[in-house]
Image (spheres, rainbow, N blue to C red):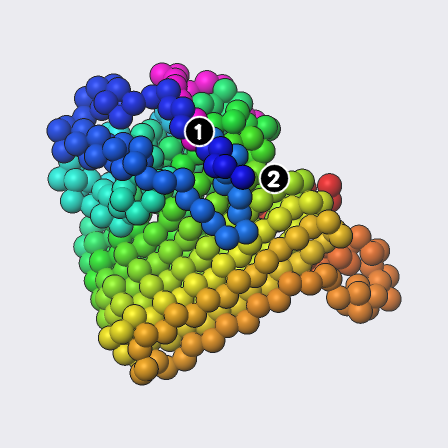
């Protein structure tokens, strides 16, 4: 079948630069990324058909539109905490507690950061997720609109999480949020993204990018909670560059019925660097989730662990890829992978694809395990014999898979929000 992907873009990189009075370096970055996007072929993925997916995006609105009840409730519970709230690409609220500002922490929407913290943004933007690595990364680099910038100075430990709440309503024209998180040497930070969509979305592409930079000795926990709805194609790239003796721990959760392709990656560039990836997915309706959790071992004695759990309902379809690449010279590196998928309905489908690429002979450990199957009925019967109804017993078993990952989310407000969403989906 001939490729049917279309490119209909109603907003231009130059128009965004003019709107936000951007400096020349950013204008050139956007223009170069746009050229790459136009020239790049439409991507092809094993087990995910992208031929009928449109690249239509824009035009962007000047006004954010009306909030959803879910977003209002979540942001209300974040009162007093550090957060940036963006709706339909427009920043509607930024709150940085005085205690963090006094420590030199910078947290603001990315457009403001380009103006007020130009040197920091210029030095790091586009260094972790480069425009020339793929079509959707290039599209985001050219047309990003709304985002967050976080900078933690050297030796500063941020005790409370920083939040990025990105909301798309039914009036959205596609989205291209971008997050840039920089943890300077021997600093510590917990960063949490929440993506909210209200009902079915217009058939506009969503392309999101998150760049995390952990310099020498820095410790970062980065969590992303999303739930895209049917309509658009959602392409996301989240990557961390991790220096000597630094660590980045990812926590990922996706609950929805949309079409999503997600790359979650750690580049263990430094000696003694470390990363963990814990992810869960609850698929409903006709959701299609293509998730790749990848770790690149370049540093000596670098370590990583990947754990992915999922539960598929209705006609949901998930592809979970766990990929570990230990490059030549990464002496003493070690990694483990564990993928477990539960099928809750006969028509649901999932593929767990573990991959190990080892170019170095001297490694401390490297293994993987993957399973796809239905709930063990012996476990259900055991709980029922204790007087627990079948539906509740099934729910308890599913939560046994999900709970450890949910508890790793560093924000109590977001954990509570996620538990509510999962309970709603499991009870539907």
User: What mark, if any, has residue 350 been given in the picture?
Assistant: none
Give the residue at x 43% y 26%: 56
Q: Residue furthest front?
A: 1
Q: Is residue 278 magenta?
A: no
**Crowdedness of circle 2 by 10 Å Cα count: few (<14), some, many (20+)?**
many
Give the residue at x 58% y 44%: 288
Q: Is residue 233 above or below residue 265?
A: above
Image position of 170 (left or right of 301): right
As helix, strand or loop, the secondary structure at mark 2 comes to: loop
Image position of 130 (left or right of 115): right
Q: Is residue 176 visible?
A: yes
Decide which of 329, 21 is in the foreground and name it: 329
Residue 343 figure quarter: bottom right
CA–CA distance in space, label 1 to label 2: 23 Å
Give the residue at x 57% y 34%: 229
Quadrant placement of the N terminus: top right
Decide which of 56, 51 is in the foreground and name it: 51
- Most frequent secondary structure within the magenta stretch: loop
Residue 12 figure quarter: top left
Decide which of 225, 104 is in the foreground and name it: 225
As helix, strand or loop, the secondary structure at mark 1 comes to: loop
Q: Is residue 76 above or below residue 418?
A: above
The residue labelled by disc 2 is 257
The residue labelled by disc 1 is 6
Q: Contact (CB < 8 A) between labels 1 and 2?
A: no
Give the residue at x 19% y 40%: 121
Start-end of magenta stretch: 55-71
Decide which of 109, 14 is in the foreground and name it: 14
Residue 9 figure quarter: top left
Q: Is residue 56 magenta?
A: yes
Residue 235, percent across and down?
Answer: 44, 41
**Crowdedness of circle 1 by 10 Å Cα count: few (<14), some, many (20+)?**
few
């Amino acid at each position: 079948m001939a490729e049917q992907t279309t490119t209909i873009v109603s907003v231009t990189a130059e128009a965004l630069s003019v709107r936000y009075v951007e400096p020349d370096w950013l204008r050139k970055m956007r223009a170069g990324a746009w050229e790459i996007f136009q020239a790049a072929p439409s991507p092809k993925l094993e087990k995910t058909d992208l031929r009928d997916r449109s690249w239509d995006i824009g035009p962007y609105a000047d006004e954010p539109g009306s909030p959803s009840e879910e977003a209002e409730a979540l942001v209300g519970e974040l009162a007093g905490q550090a957060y940036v709230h963006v709706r339909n690409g427009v920043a509607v609220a930024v709150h940085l507690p005085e205690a963090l500002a006094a420590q030199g922490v910078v947290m603001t929407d990315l457009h403001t950061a380009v103006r007020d913290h130009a040197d920091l943004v210029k030095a790091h933007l586009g260094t972790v997720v480069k425009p020339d690595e793929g079509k959707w990364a290039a599209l985001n680099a050219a047309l990003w609109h709304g985002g967050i910038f976080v900078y933690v100075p050297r030796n500063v430990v941020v005790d409370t999480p920083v939040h990025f709440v990105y909301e798309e309503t039914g009036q959205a024209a596609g989205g291209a949020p971008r997050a840039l998180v920089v943890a300077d040497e021997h600093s510590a930070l917990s960063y949490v993204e929440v993506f909210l969509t209200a009902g079915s979305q217009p058939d506009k592409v969503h392309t999101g990018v998150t760049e995390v930079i952990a310099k020498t000795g820095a410790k970062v926990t980065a969590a992303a909670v999303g739930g895209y709805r049917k309509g658009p194609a959602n392409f996301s790239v989240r990557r961390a560059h991790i220096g000597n003796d630094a660590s980045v721990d990812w926590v990922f959760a996706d609950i929805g019925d949309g079409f999503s392709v997600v790359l979650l990656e750690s580049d263990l560039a430094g000696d003694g660097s470390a990363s963990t990836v814990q992810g869960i997915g609850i698929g409903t309706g006709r959701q299609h989730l293509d998730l790749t959790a990848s770790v690149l071992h370049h540093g000596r004695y670098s370590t990583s662990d990947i754990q992915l759990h999922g539960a598929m309902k209705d006609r949901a379809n998930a592809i979970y890829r766990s990929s570990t690449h230990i490059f030549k010279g990464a002496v003493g590196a070690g990694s483990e992978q564990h993928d477990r998928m539960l099928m809750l309905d006969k028509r649901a489908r999932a593929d767990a694809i573990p991959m190990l690429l080892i170019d170095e002979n001297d490694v401390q450990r490297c293994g993987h395990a993957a399973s796809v199957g239905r709930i063990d009925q012996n476990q259900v019967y055991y709980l029922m014999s204790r007087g627990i109804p079948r539906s509740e017993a099934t729910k308890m078993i599913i939560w046994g898979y999900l709970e450890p990952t949910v508890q790793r989310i560093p924000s109590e407000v977001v954990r509570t929000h996620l538990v509510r969403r999962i309970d709603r989906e499991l009870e539907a």
